[in-house]
Amino acid sequence: MYEFDYHHPDSVAAAIALRAGAADGSYLAGGMTLLPTLKQRLASPSDLIDLAGVTGLTGIEVTADRVTIGAMTRHAEVAASEQIKGSIPALAFLASQIGDTQVRNRGTLGGSVANSDPSADYPAAVIGLGATLQTDHRTIAAEDYFQDLFQTALEEGELIRSIAFPIPRRAAYRKFPNPASRYAVVGVFVAQFAAGVRVGVTGAGPCAFRPAEFEAALNQRLDPAALDDVVIDHDRFNSDMHASAEYRGNLLRVMARRAVADLLAQPA
Amino acid sequence: MSDTGIGKSVKRREDIRFITGQGRYTDDITQPDQTMAVFLRSPHPRARIVSIDASAALEIPGVVGVYTGKDLSADKIGDIPCGWLVKSADGTDMLVASRPPLAVEWVNFVGETYGIVVAETLAAARAGAEAVVTEFEDLKAVATLADALGGPQIHANVPDNLCFHWELGDGAQTDAAFAAAAHVTTLELTNNRLIPNAMEPRAAVGIYDRSTEEFTLYTTSQNPHLERLILSAFVNLAPEHKLRVISPDVGGGFGSKIFVYPEETAVAWAAKQVGRPVKWTADRSEAFLSDAHGRDHITTAELAMDKDGVFLGFRVRTRANLGAYLSTFASSVPTYLYGTLLAGQYRTPAIHVAVDGVYTNTAPVDAYRGAGRPEATYVIERIVETAARELGVDPAELRRRNFIRPDQFPYQTPVALIYDTGDYEASLDKALKLVDYAGFPERRKASEARGKKRGIGLSCYIEACGLAPSQLAIQLGAGVGLYESGEVRVNPTASVTVFTGSHSHGQGHETTFAQIVSDRLGIPFENVEIVHGDTGRVEFGLGTYGSRSVAVGGSALMKATDKIIVKGKRIAAHMLDAKPEDVDFEEGIFAVRATNRKLTFGEVAFAAYVPANFPEDLEPGLSEKSFYDPKNFTFPAGTHIAEVEIDPETGVVTVAKFVAVDDFGEVINPMIVEGQVHGGIAQGIGQALLEHGVYDGMGQLVTGSFMDYCMPRADDLPNFIVDTTVTACTHNPLGVKGCGEAGAIGSPPAIINAVTDALGIRDIAMPASPERVWRAAQGL
């Protein structure tokens, strides 16, 4: 780890100001990606602005039509939340599948979504549910947020405060974990709303996305078999030693089918 | 019998300190005025070092010194040697590549050390290492085994990168067997490269005392005396009597800590240069890059049979990856620990094996849990299973037809070994019963009804343990004997301090050895202390590997304990006015036969140190030592059976059942043995399904962290069903054979036999990863 200045602000405004004043500052949320990167000396921020003490960034609020989760809320809290289990159980389940116990106790929703790792779980739900990100100065729709590999709509220094997830009628998440890292090789979030079915995919591509063909097929017939003949173009999918693009394409279909089956197993 | 005696599942006494954080590992050793070291490591798989400029590093506050290979050479520090000389089939010696502890001109794998930076703090040492400017001339590397023979020549003295071409067995006789065969099964196999990943990474603390000119090296070694011997005799670090090597608590080794490494050597040397203690602890990334890796073979095997499936001949051609340099025992692993095991449990009359050991631009490859024997077992048990399928014979039945029968021991195999005892059918029968072999078709149907594929696979393994009869080992090229030493020191108050040359790095010796000695002397288990891992306290030792500790180290302690009893009888006889031959010793009591005259062990021990009226020929004291040199290897054997269920849509393999029935001979502590078996199976399943050390085509390590290198975890494993059969080893006093490696040896072929059975295919490469299995299941 290289040396850096450490800051522990107590408000969003102070955090923003510190970030703006730093030569090459970085926010620290749960640190589950940033800290290993620092330890390996792969990053050398001048300033680390720890968000752990910032008020107003944590907490879960459920209204009639949405679940709003503070950006610094830990995965373990989302996984255990009775409120979320009662409104979007698939979201609590997704959080329970992230990393391991230690990661879930440290990692945060905002950190995961801000980082936009192509294999992270949360982005599948953010885009699958059509969530809205509230930052320090604006709102961003999920569709506009994920742009490319580790690239999002966040501007330099922009801070996610919370994310609001619309409550679907039913939803389900299935992931195929990397046997080593337990990141999603492919993760599929399927949500049924009054207006139709949405599908969010993580792991397969450079960032989370909605497979239009899957949504079209499922909006015609909400059944796992509806996905059997959908053509999957895996040319732009990720490929690594654990999974080729072709295999990811297969997993996308299999995980989607299983998610739909899980969704249909829930009361309508 | 007491509840802490031989055969009892005594809880491991060392675990109390391990699980409460009281273990004392090398990194816990902190010396006054200590400095920290960081190594300069090659980022290139193969390169020439053009220049190293440390001037900027030396300017960094806290940096104490920067040393390179040239500094070590100037101080006459020698190469790190390989301890086993293998000869090629043409009688020539293997070609040894020079391996200085810090590379001088050439670096040959990513992570190879070429310099050491010593500083006040770890942070300063890291900063110093980054400030060193090294110019490399990058050269094309040999990245894989497949590329080795035709690739660029790595070492000037090794044409074709061929270190040795070794053969064993009668080639002409084997050819004749094939000519007469009714059926031949052929299989091409890969044994995947593994990275050991002991829980504790390697570490060292070097100390130099100017007043006595003595070095002390704390390090994570499985055999501290061997480390001292090599550092003295070959590396020229210090004379043996001026070097003390201490291996305190060590958190796992699996073979990777047998060897003498550059880092430990350089740390000890640097302590003298800077005149202060120097500490280094590998981080996990360094461990991945620089610990000796395991396995990495490609093999063609052919099995010749008559019309009834009786094995006539076995021909094996293997290319073994040795990495960039020969590690301490590297050359013995794919030869004498591999080729000699190719008879397996079978009567195959003619066997011929040829092994090409080749250099590549990868980390050195050496012994890893099983060391050669997993590779041999994989070849045998995969081809036997395949042969059974080709012949349409039940795989258990084909094995039965070919087993060496109990009445055929001692059995001379065609590949040099003489098996002393065994009953292979007994283990097979028990395992078949435990797995409910007869019920498998029903279970397969049930799986198929759920859209899954189910398979079952057998593996009847044998291993040679208890390394080793010194005369034989030295004759075959070993640079040292492979006996063990033990000392039993009875204190005046009758507590006993035991010194063993074996080294515990997780095996539980402090418990097992105390069981042996306390049982034999009839004294409380608590009164026996086991000392190991310190050349300053233990006379000599050859350490722990090859499942040798109880068979060789335990036998040495038995011999020393027996000498205590002999001496005790002489003392008792004197005190009781009898002849020593009339004194019996049982359960801690010396008694004159057919009288009521007796003394406790405690009374005799006290008298030994308070010799009021000993005659001239009776020395005071009660302390004895012994060296035990085994007469033969021991031959643990057994049957492992795996049952797997496969999801054909994703390729995920679930191990549904795993049965291991092992014959380890007599067992000292069944609970510890069971734990060893569990750990071994976990590693074997890891090899078969999860673990893979991968270099890319350029020679960069792809699997350099746990993000990509998949260690087996509890939820990857079923509840193991383990049991034993017993044929006692015929040639050591305890009747034991050793249990440390069996799980890792027997299990991989059982798993792959089950996977190929489920999928109806001939072969699948290890690890049978989800994508590989999916492709096979889909016929892609």
Image (spheres, coloured by chain):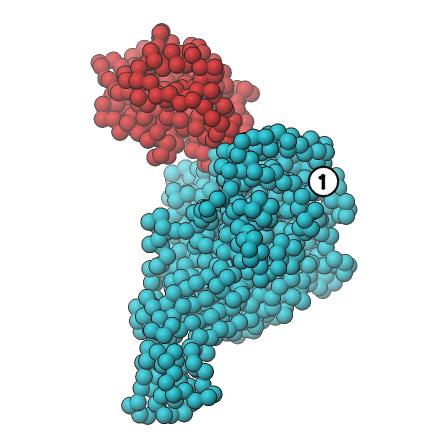
Chain colours: A red, B cyan
Residue B253 in the image, given as x and y percentages of width and height: 50, 51
Q: Image height check: is B241 above or below A90?
A: below
The residue positioned 70% from the left and 36% from the top of the image is B49
Q: Secondary structure at mark 1?
A: loop
> Residue under mark 1: which chain is it in?
B
The residue positioned 54% from the left and 27% from the top of the image is A239
Res A17 visible: yes
- In this view, the residue in front, A65 or B180, is A65
- In this view, the residue in front, A131 or B301, is A131
Residue B315 in the image, given as x and y percentages of width and height: 67, 57
Residue A209 in the image, given as x and y percentages of width and height: 44, 17
Res B454 visible: no
Q: Image height check: is A19 above or below B471?
A: above
Residue holding disc 1: B105
Label 1 Cα crowd, 10 Å radius (few <14 / some 14-19 / many 20+): some
Q: Quadrant of residue A261?
A: top left
Residue furthest to the top: A138
Q: Image height check: is A73 above or below B20?
A: above
Amino acid under disc 1: Glu
Q: Is residue B373 left or right of residue A182?
A: right
The residue positioned 33% from the left and 73% from the top of the image is B493
Q: Quadrant of the C terminus of chain B?
A: top right
Q: Image height check: is B194 above or below B7?
A: above
Q: Is residue B338 left or right of residue B406?
A: right
Residue B40 in the image, given as x and y percentages of width and height: 60, 37
Q: Quadrant of the N terminus of chain B?
A: bottom left
Q: Is residue B669 left or right of residue B260?
A: left
Q: How many marks?
A: 1
The residue positioned 53% from the left and 58% from the top of the image is B244
